[in-house]
Amino acid sequence: MNRHRIADVRITPIAFRDPPLLNVAGVHQPWALRSIIELETDSGLVGLGESYGEADTLADLQRIAPDLIGLDPFALNELTHRVYARTSGDGDPAVGAPYPPRGDKARASALGAFEVACWDLQGQITGLPLHQLLGGPVRPDVSYSAYLFYKYARHHADPGYPTDTWGEALDPQQLVEQARRMVGQYGFGSIKLKAGVFEPELEVEGLQALRAAFPHHPLRIDPNGGWSVATTRRMMPALARDGLLEYLEDPVGTLEEMAEVATFAPMPLATNMVTIAFGHLPRSVQLNAVQVVLSDHHYWGGLRATQQLAAIGRVFGLGISMHSNSHLGISLAAMTHVGVTLPNLAYACDTHYPWQEDEVIEGGKLPLRDGRLAPPPGPGLGVRLDRQALARLHRHYLDCGIRRRDDASEMRKHQPDFDPTRPRF
Amino acid sequence: MNRHRIADVRITPIAFRDPPLLNVAGVHQPWALRSIIELETDSGLVGLGESYGEADTLADLQRIAPDLIGLDPFALNELTHRVYARTSGDGDPAVGAPYPPRGDKARASALGAFEVACWDLQGQITGLPLHQLLGGPVRPDVSYSAYLFYKYARHHADPGYPTDTWGEALDPQQLVEQARRMVGQYGFGSIKLKAGVFEPELEVEGLQALRAAFPHHPLRIDPNGGWSVATTRRMMPALARDGLLEYLEDPVGTLEEMAEVATFAPMPLATNMVTIAFGHLPRSVQLNAVQVVLSDHHYWGGLRATQQLAAIGRVFGLGISMHSNSHLGISLAAMTHVGVTLPNLAYACDTHYPWQEDEVIEGGKLPLRDGRLAPPPGPGLGVRLDRQALARLHRHYLDCGIRRRDDASEMRKHQPDFDPTRPRF
């Protein structure tokens, strides 16, 4: 087989419409940012990646890009070395320093963005679906959960911005309606409620309404660290009653607080906020602060890192699932390829995908059925870039003016005195 | 790319000459056993593996073999599932149970034997050297250490068995002579002494003689759990003086004892005896019982498992090196391919390779220079089976009559009252 080398690196910032979804930090802006990564080889193959579109991430990716010219897409250790040489952090895993940099999400994110594109190239070069290169499937598909949000009916201001079809969801009844539509449309078998928005008692009422409407769906709630330990303790009897929750995600904001909650929480605690890098794991394990790590290849450092995290989870008794930000099909394909290879992926994964109407891949949205998705067939990720869509979404990026996600400022358009300081409750 | 499927599985037991090397359990028998694994695809490719040749291992491999027919060599998770379905243990990693079975070295060994052969096939199918499929090199070669043994000049009895050229090594002076020859011939940059044979004071004298003869070579001693905690405490001042040791390997025989030794040992403790499976790691970390894990793809479950172990080592602050039994070139090639991909392989690896004159691969012994070996070039492992050699070594197996390693019985031919009960000292 001829060696293939990376000859061009393209990073295209895009923006796509995002509904006014509420969370602890405020409300989603009308446009969500993302970056599309293309690694083109001297042989003309194009490997795809998708990552954050914030200015900081784009600057990291652009700074690294020239160093990737000439790289063999199989040389993932060399990729790591080059990415880490251009990003700050506490150590370089390629030379055996303590790894990874403690909490340095930025450099692991840059690595993850390029690493997925390299895997896509490896798949195209070998003719193999990406999951085959990752050890092959242990299941045919990945289960995702319905990801419910409290939401406004429409974004503030801009009269030209189209209103989404999901409507308002500010009370238990509207939440159940949202769930009925989302479960009906996609077949999800479990439900997650993004919380930390209203008084915890109201949010638990929402959960109870969901339980009544969906007696057999595992339920989760994610206050995003918006509660104090005392508030979490106050809510615990209601959260624990009749096994209401499959797990409780990030009720509080620090590892130490999570460890305290773990002493009185009968259900597993999950996180994508306090254990978000390999360097956090020893103390996390020592404190038994969390029982489920919501992995995310975007900031853990890619698909190899996701597999390593899952392996650590098996050895140290941590459950594994997946976290999601607003994303499109390249990310969903990558999550699904790695997800089918993880023996201990014991929970349905989170995805914002139903909230996004735009897509950047050929053929439009990937089809979630029964809440599940199989890896797209074909070599590598199995998805191809729709260049017209890419140009359109890039145009949105240029026009929307947003360069950094700021849910708090957006929220202040609705509530001028909004204060996102946590714990909010 | 066409799919390749495993169409034939061949497991050939072999025996090769082994010198009368002394250790805590007795003395090496005249013949060392090994198994050579061949996975042949429907397309005529042959992937190679090498593992233990004891009767138990052979029975495991033979029982699993029929289940591998039809397997895609890339489907390593499915391989794991099939191997674990045919071997006993506490859990099946393919379905997320606690992993791996606590201390079940046998099933991980069976997995490792076949897994390497699958990787070899993957390399041949893709045309890539195995280390490229493992993420690519972080260094050009792997450093190995000189592995010194106390030894007799010749095996007991059998007048037809040829005498090796290494001679006797029963005192410090003879040990230094052995080291001079081995370092001179192979260029090793560090030295390990297999101990647990004589009174610890005599063995430390041996170390001190080595230190005088090789002032700059890192030194290690491995009593194979042959000492008590009290003995280890007694020897510690001499072992610690002037930084004599790079690390102290398995002075005592249990995890708890190692943890106790760690409280008074100033040098790192290494092991291939008390932390030998993933299930041992949590307690090992919790007790800080060992600081260096001597990995071994043969019993940790293969090359992926070795990479996972190394990743865990990086996260939890464990050093990583490699353990070795008597082995030939297929094993050495596999160790070297995975070794160049491990960022935190911070110590020279152990190998018995210089003690073996026989070889089963084309071209004879792999060339260790300056104590180092680069991965053999070419697709996969980069080594091919010498079928005449295989037939010859299989004939030795049939003729030698040994079916299970038994160093103690062999030792009793020299010392009828030999008692291998540990701690011996």
Image: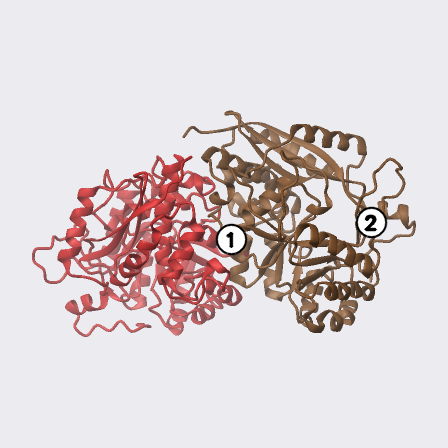
Chain colours: A red, B brown
**Image quarter of residue B216:** bottom right
Q: Chain of mark 1?
A: B
Q: Establish if A146 lies above or below B222.
A: above
> Is B159 displayed left or right of A108 in the figure?
right
User: Mark 2 and 1 residues: CB-CB less than 8 Å, in contact?
Assistant: no
Q: At label 1, which amino acid type do we have?
A: Arg
Cα distance in 3D space between marks 2 and 1: 36 Å
> Is B267 displayed left or right of A77 in the figure?
right
Q: Residue furthest front?
A: B184
Labelled disc at residue B167:
2
Q: Establish if B8 lies above or below A342.
A: above
Question: Is residue A245 in view?
Answer: no
Per the image, label 2 sits on a secondary structure element best described as: loop
Residue B198 is situated, as x and y percent measured from the top left of the image, at 83, 60
> Is B224 displayed left or right of A158 in the figure?
right
- Quadrant, the C terminus of chain B: bottom right
Q: Nearer the viewer, residue A22 or B373?
A: B373
Residue B64 is situated, as x and y percent measured from the top left of the image, at 62, 33
The structure residue drawn at horizontal position 39% and vertical position 65%, both measured from the top left corner, is: A104
Q: Nearer the viewer, residue B252 or B370?
A: B370
> Is A40 displayed left or right of B425 in the figure?
left
Labelled disc at residue B139:
1
In the image, are marks 2 and 1 on the same chain?
yes
Q: Establish if B331 lies above or below B320.
A: above
- Quadrant, the N terminus of chain B: top left
Mark 2 surroundings: few (<14), some (14-19) or many (≥20) residues within 10 A: some
